[in-house]
Image (cartoon, rainbow, N blue to C red):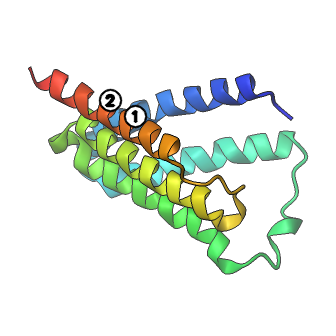
Amino acid sequence: MPTATQSAAVMLTAGIGIPVLAALNAALGQRMGSPVAAGVILFLVALLTTLVVFLLSGGSLKGAVGSPPHLFFAGCLVAFYVLTITWVAPSFGIGNAVFFVLLGQLISAAAIDHFGLFGAQPSPLTFWRISGIAVMGLGVFLTQIAGRS
């Protein structure tokens, strides 16, 4: 089990990758003339990468059999994110697109934690958590305003 510091570092790295993913795939979509085609390429590369890691780790798909169907909806959400960011980012801007993605993530994460949805460990939405989320949202908003000046 990773430590809290290791988990934070891994997730920070993943977070850094999100705008890079958006910029690269948006550029590919423009080059190909189709955001959907760029999404297909992205998912093929992602599938191959995941498959290699899966095989190297000795993974098994046994646990997927009999799992509730709604758990597979995550794949639809990832496709929705990739397709929309690839389509919107070239005209809206990477920063603007990611700003709204981050805002949506803050809201969704707070609700998931508060209600313990999807098996998440419940973490009540206290005044301090709401304040922290608001400060984070304000910080993201301010970076967008500063980028326009």
The one of 132 and 85 positioned closer to us in this rendering = 132
In the image, what residue type sits under mark 2? Gly
Q: Position of residue 70 (x, y in %)?
A: 63, 76
Vertical side of 102 occupied by 40: above or below: below
Q: Which of the 4 image quadrants contains residue 114?
A: bottom right
Query: Circle 1 sits in a helix, a strand or a loop, which is it?
Result: helix
Q: Report, in whole angstroms, how far the alpha carbon at label 2 lies from the one at label 1.
A: 5 Å
Q: Residue furthest left?
A: 149
Q: Position of residue 88 (x, y in %)?
A: 24, 49
Q: Give residue 124's mark.
A: none
The residue depicted at 44 percent of the width and 47 percent of the height is: 106
Q: Position of residue 149 (x, y in %)?
A: 8, 20
From the viewer's perspective, is 148 left or right of 76?
A: left
The residue depicted at 50 percent of the width and 40 percent of the height is: 128
In the image, what residue type sits under mark 1? Met
Q: Residue furthest front?
A: 127
The one of 104 and 59 positioned closer to us in this rendering = 104
Quarter of the image where the N terminus is located:
top right
From the viewer's perspective, is 52 left or right of 138?
A: right
The residue depicted at 45 percent of the width and 49 percent of the height is: 105
From the viewer's perspective, is 34 left or right of 59?
A: left
Q: Give residue 139's mark.
A: 2
The one of 145 and 46 positioned closer to us in this rendering = 145
Q: Which of the 4 image quadrants contains residue 32?
A: top left
The reply to whether dot 2 and dot 1 touch (C-beta < 8 Å) is: yes
Q: Give residue 136's mark.
A: 1
